[in-house]
Image (cartoon, rainbow, N blue to C red):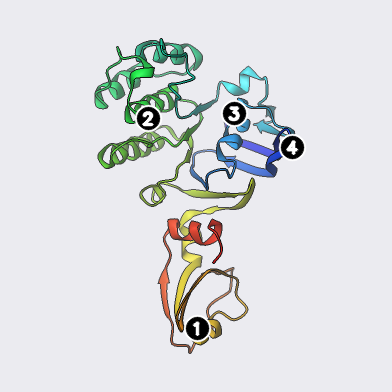
Amino acid sequence: MSELVCKNISKAYKKKKVLHGIDLTIEQGKIYGLIGRNGAGKTTLLSVMTAQNPATGGEVILDGMPVWENQQALEHLCFSRELNTLSILGPNSVKVKEYLMMARMYYPNWDREMEKRLVERFDLNVKKRISKLSKGMLSMVTIIVALASKADITILDEPVAGLDVVARTDFYQLLMEEHVNSGRTFIISTHIIEEAANVFEEVIFLKDGMILLKENTQELLERAVHVSGLAGEVDAACEGLTIHHVENIGRSKGVTVLLSAGQQLHPGHDVTVQPVSLQNLFVALCGREA
């Protein structure tokens, strides 16, 4: 498989429009980070991309095949999302081992040996019922399903929710190992941005149901700078440039600038220029304006 393409995807629930004309191409063999605020439409977009939710308009194509109601295409996709213990099957829900057995039947390329290794690595009690698992254990189940599915394009929605820092580090190591060994495509949606930034080859910012940007992570961060100093000096250094997230403190000022190709700050001004982390860039572009 090579490309998953969203063509002018829109989604509305009654009168509320959640996605607005999404055009997006997911290329083979990359790890993508999908980042957006709560309510930006991330989970809705991912569910439409994997045919778990019908689009109101537009189409999702996998290597020339429509994804919707197409088993041949769906066999190459896995969307592993947060489990809701209240809705999965009620208080008498299945045991972990039964849930994994169902996943084994659903995904044609399931790796049983990987499933066993991950269960042991996470020290997961497979005899427990899904409804009785802690939030961290629920995340472990979703990670096992995602990795063991061996799906060409694998999507994880908030995979590290509830995991402590050691388990999160372990997950990203497992993800990188699997990516290197298999060449699979991964899309990770997460609110814990900074520790995942080095994993993302490309990053997608989603804002108000629209794609704000999709770019190589390193190239994006090389274009972003934080400029601070006396307000007049900052204004002069950034004249004509697009600035974001203005911070005024007395006579001083700080701004985030995302430079386009060939652009640079105006020289000769007494300002401090610092690199911007992916998390701070996201806040600057998608946070509430001052």
Q: Tell me how far mark 2 sits from mark 3, CA to CA.
A: 20 Å
Is the Cβ of the residue at disc 3 closer than 8 Å to that at disc 4?
Answer: no
In this rendered view, identify the residue nearer to me: 136 or 270. 136
Frontmost of labels 3 and 4 is 4
Residue tagged by mark 3? 50
In this rendered view, identify the residue nearer to me: 237 or 246. 246
Residue type highlighted by circle 4: Lys
Is the Cβ of the residue at disc 2 closer than 8 Å to that at disc 1?
Answer: no
Residue tagged by mark 1? 231
Q: Is residue 9 left or right of residue 232?
A: right
Is residue 226 visible in the rendered image? The answer is yes
Residue type highlighted by circle 3: Thr
Which residue is located at x 46 percent, y 14 percent? 90
- The secondary element bearing badge 1 is classed as helix
Q: Tell me how far mark 3 sits from mark 4, CA to CA.
A: 23 Å
Residue 128, quarter of picture: top left
